[in-house]
Amino acid sequence: MTRATRLRAAAVLWVTLCLLRAASAHAHTPSLSVLALDERSPGEFIASWERTQGIHDVSAAYDLLKPVFPEHCEFAAPRLDCGERGLSGRIGFDGLGDLSTAGIIKIHRVDGNTQVLSLTAAQPHVRVSEARLDTSASRGVYNFIWLGITHIWLGLDHLLFVVGLLWLLDSWRVLIKTVTAFTIAHSLTLGAATFGLHILPTAPVEAVIALSIAFVAVEIAGEARTKQPSLTRKRPWLVAFAFGLLHGFGFASALAELEIAKAELPIALLCFNVGVEIGQLVFIAGLLALRLALRTLERATSLRFAMAGCYAMGVLAMYWFFERIVAFMPDV
């Protein structure tokens, strides 16, 4: 087993175990909560939860997620009164964490404008102003890019699939071709899904995404056992493109939650996809840095790393698969 193979073995095991640990808290998708603020008259809003994933009692969501509004605003759920100064200042959540790892605040203005704020536990607050609410183009770019970045970083299934692909790549040239194929594929289906041009239901697609991870894990284990190159190693761009089509539908679920107006879909789609690519490239760069840092790995431990890594990946993938199958099965 070559040094490069040993390094890939250690890297895939380390990252898989980290994702497995995180999965105990976050399962297969980022737990996203969505709070809508509907302006009924200038400065006066009605708050409502459109989604409280991880929190079954909607009435308790305010206590658990702890929405934060500008100091001059008075909030008594569901009413928010910001007076003549309007909704201008610091806004976000103080309770983002294990129950809900990401949050969206949608501000629907009385004049028809809408602002979408993307928040995470790492960045739970932002500052808004009345002026920013009037320019739809400028207000959405940063938020949608950040939403794409956080979606890929919190999407453990997507990250683990990328880990498996990188494990089976031998050169920079192959890496570039494979990442490009994956990007083109998920961009195509992300766009199609966002504009309503698909007929595939989300739940089965998510289940097949889990199987894509199991497939790569089987490929890794098969190579270690037979010493023969797998399909993914021989045609990595083909495997990446095929499964990338499915992963694109998974990415689209984040945009679907926002119910974006048709006029804003093009810029939202572009910025979200840019964010996904930024997040993916940063993650890949981290994996490559880890590979370089493990150059001193001993040959005797490399095979154990390889097998433990692919088995951990496969077990986690099948756990997600059965969890997602059960989620959309009818009650008996």
Image (tube, rainbow, N blue to C red):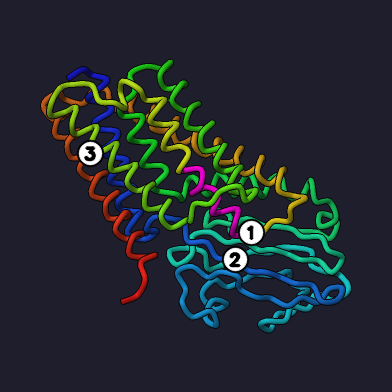
Residue annotated with mark 3 = 310
What's the mark number on residue 258? 1
Under mark 1, the amino acid is Leu
Q: Compared to 283, does 25 lie above or below?
A: below
Whether residue 253 sits left or right of residue 285 in the image: it is right
Which badge, 2 or 1, comes first in the chain's sequence?
A: 2
Q: Which residues are magenta?
A: 247-257
Is there CB contact under 8 Å for labels 2 and 1? yes
Where is the N terminus found, in terms of image quarters?
Answer: top left
Q: Secondary structure at mark 3?
A: helix
Under mark 3, the amino acid is Cys
Whether residue 298 sits left or right of residue 246 in the image: it is left
Whether residue 167 sits left or right of residue 197 in the image: it is left
Residue 8, quarter of picture: top left
Whether residue 105 sits left or right of residue 284 in the image: it is right
Real-space Cα distance between discs 3 and 2?
Answer: 36 Å
Residue annotated with mark 2 = 34
